[in-house]
């Protein structure tokens, strides 16, 4: 749990945000409890004064929800957030006003965040009026002119009477930034602040935001799925997956020496900076699961390249990953054994065909095994222990006989992993903290998979 550090501005302590808490019609029909969307779950994070903290992750992982919690647009379902040492949910009325002045948010779409019927002057002066800042019209007008010049809209006088539709996308976002800055905040949450802008003007807006950070003494949170932006802007970075922070630390360390297999996969998928360099795709299987019904244990385990075999596993990790994936495909109904077996004269060749399909991984070409093609793999090329192969064969025969329960029992006996059983705690590794069983204290885990992950 985060401690009250002298340099910290924001401390997120074990925060969760759940949506749709009531039972749906399907829940009622099945007599089960409500299945809320766990948009943010058990998040701990400290944001230090003067830092730019990046929050990265795929769409739907909870970045915006976390951002909105930070500016009190949402209240946590559980946990607490301290701003400058004070619990945000316990602010008195007068303190709330001060908070709303000190904390601002900039959204992705400047067109939506600006009122189309207000001129630039009206938009930017409004927060001064709401917060009762400034000494009359003339003083406020001067403050508006000053901030418009600061955000590069100069001469400011030329912009005062413009409406949003008369401005370019970049100009509109600068007005949105001016609106946030005019009240002289300490902390700004920027949610994808340049993703709607033309690529050619993004760098200009980002550089401006860096300059403003020095000038106004700001602390920023940058939410983005764009890892090049995170790399360029942020001192520290937190990586989210299905509502959890799976890794965080100094951006250079997170980028150059990722600890969590998800972080590694995420950065694998980013095109290199050098023009013409090959894009290396991520070594992950499947899609992001439904946040209403997330996987057990480590939520990333069904997709993870480094899933951990049991201690007595004698084959390769790759073979375990394939066997485990076979089990999941059976569990989720994704392995159509009858279709695969169709047209095979005897059960033995049908079982061979199911194994060839079930043990292949749907991975980008650069991560496929030598004997892998068109969704099948040569089973002899996999280093799988005899006993495990026999269990797969026997489970497949059960499946062909329609006996899924016995099949699952055998598969569970052979292909069980700590990653599916228990949720990993955040642990220090190098400069970062990461939630992955590879970094648990049991040395057998690390030796089995990640001999170089022992720091
Ligand atoms: N108001 C809401 N009601 C119900 N579910 C919500 C609500 N807001 C977000 N969610 C769900 O919570 C999860 C996290 O959403 P969130 O928008 O925070 O993710 P994100 O990482 O910001 O995604 P994106 O980059 O696409 O905006 C998603 O599954 C989303 O559908």
Image (cartoon, rainbow, N blue to C red):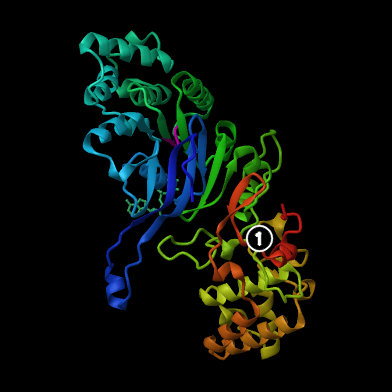
**Magenta residue check for 152:** no
Q: Nearer the viewer, residue 159 or 296?
A: 296
* Residue 229 vertical placement versus 261 (above, below): above
Name the side, left or right, on which 354 lies relative to 79.
right
172 over 323 or under it: above or below = above
- Side of 75 where 10 appears, left or right: right
Rendering quarter of residue 243:
bottom left
Q: Which of 142 and 226 is in front in this view?
A: 142
Q: Is residue 18 above or below residue 339?
A: above
Residue 359 makes an appearance in the image: no
x and y percentages locating residue 4 in the rendered image = 46, 42
Give the x, y percent position of residue 108. Answer: 40, 35
Q: Is mark 1 on a helix, strand or loop?
A: helix
Residue at x-position 32% and y-position 13%: 143
Q: Is residue 191 magenta?
A: yes
- The range drawn in magenta is 190-194
Whether residue 70 is visible to the viewer of this picture, yes or no, is yes
Circle 1: is it few (<14), some (14-19), or many (20+) Cα within 10 Å?
A: many
132 lies left or right of 315: left
Across and down, in percent, residue 354 comes to 65, 79
Label 1 sits on residue = 438
- Helix, strand or loop for the magenta stretch, by majority: loop
């Amino acid at each position: 749990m985060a401690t009250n550090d002298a340099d910290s501005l924001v401390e997120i302590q074990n925060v969760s945000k759940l949506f749709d808490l009531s039972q749906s019609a399907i829940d009622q029909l099945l007599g089960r409890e409500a299945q809320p969307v766990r948009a943010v779950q058990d998040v701990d994070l400290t944001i230090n004064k003067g830092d730019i903290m990046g929050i990265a992750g795929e769409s739907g992982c909870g970045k915006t929800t976390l951002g909105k919690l930070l500016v009190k647009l949402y209240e946590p379902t559980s946990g607490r957030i301290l701003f400058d040492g004070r619990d945000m949910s316990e602010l008195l009325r007068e303190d709330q006003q001060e908070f709303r002045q000190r904390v601002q948010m900039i959204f992705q779409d400047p067109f939506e965040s600006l009122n189309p019927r207000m001129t630039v002057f009206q938009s930017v002066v409004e927060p001064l009026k709401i917060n009762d800042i400034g000494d009359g019209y003339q003083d406020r007008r001067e403050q508006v002119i000053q901030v418009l010049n600061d955000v590069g809209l100069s001469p400011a006088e030329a912009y005062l009477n413009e409406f949003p539709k008369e401005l370019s996308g970049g100009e509109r976002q600068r007005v949105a930034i001016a609106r946030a800055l005019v009240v002289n905040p300490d902390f700004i949450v920027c949610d994808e602040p340049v993703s709607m802008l033309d690529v050619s003007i993004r760098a200009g807006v980002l550089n401006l935001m860096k300059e403003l950070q020095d000038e106004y003494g700001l602390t920023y949170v940058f939410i983005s799925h764009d890892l090049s932006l995170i790399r360029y802007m942020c001192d520290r970075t937190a990586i989210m997956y299905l509502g959890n922070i799976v890794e965080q630390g100094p951006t250079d360390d997170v980028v150059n020496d990722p600890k969590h297999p998800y972080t590694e996969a995420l950065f694998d998928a980013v095109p290199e900076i050098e023009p013409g360099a090959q894009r290396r795709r991520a070594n992950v299987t499947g899609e992001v699961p439904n946040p209403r019904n997330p996987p057990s244990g480590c939520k990333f385990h069904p997709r993870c390249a480094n899933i951990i075999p049991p201690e007595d596993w004698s084959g390769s990790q790759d073979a375990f990953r394939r066997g485990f994936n076979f089990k999941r495909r059976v569990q989720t109904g994704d392995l159509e054994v009858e279709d695969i077996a169709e047209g095979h004269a005897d059960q033995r060749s049908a079982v061979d065909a199911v194994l060839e399909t079930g043990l292949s991984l749907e991975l980008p070409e650069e991560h496929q095994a030598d004997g892998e093609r068109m969704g099948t793999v040569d089973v002899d090329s996999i280093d799988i222990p005899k006993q495990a192969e026999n269990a797969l064969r026997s489970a497949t025969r059960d499946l062909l006989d329609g006996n899924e329960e016995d099949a699952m029992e055998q598969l569970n006996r052979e292909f069980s992993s700590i990653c599916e059983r228990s949720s990993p705690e955040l642990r220090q590794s190098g400069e970062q903290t990461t939630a992955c069983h590879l970094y648990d204290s049991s040395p057998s885990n690390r030796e089995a998979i990640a001999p170089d992950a022992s720091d």
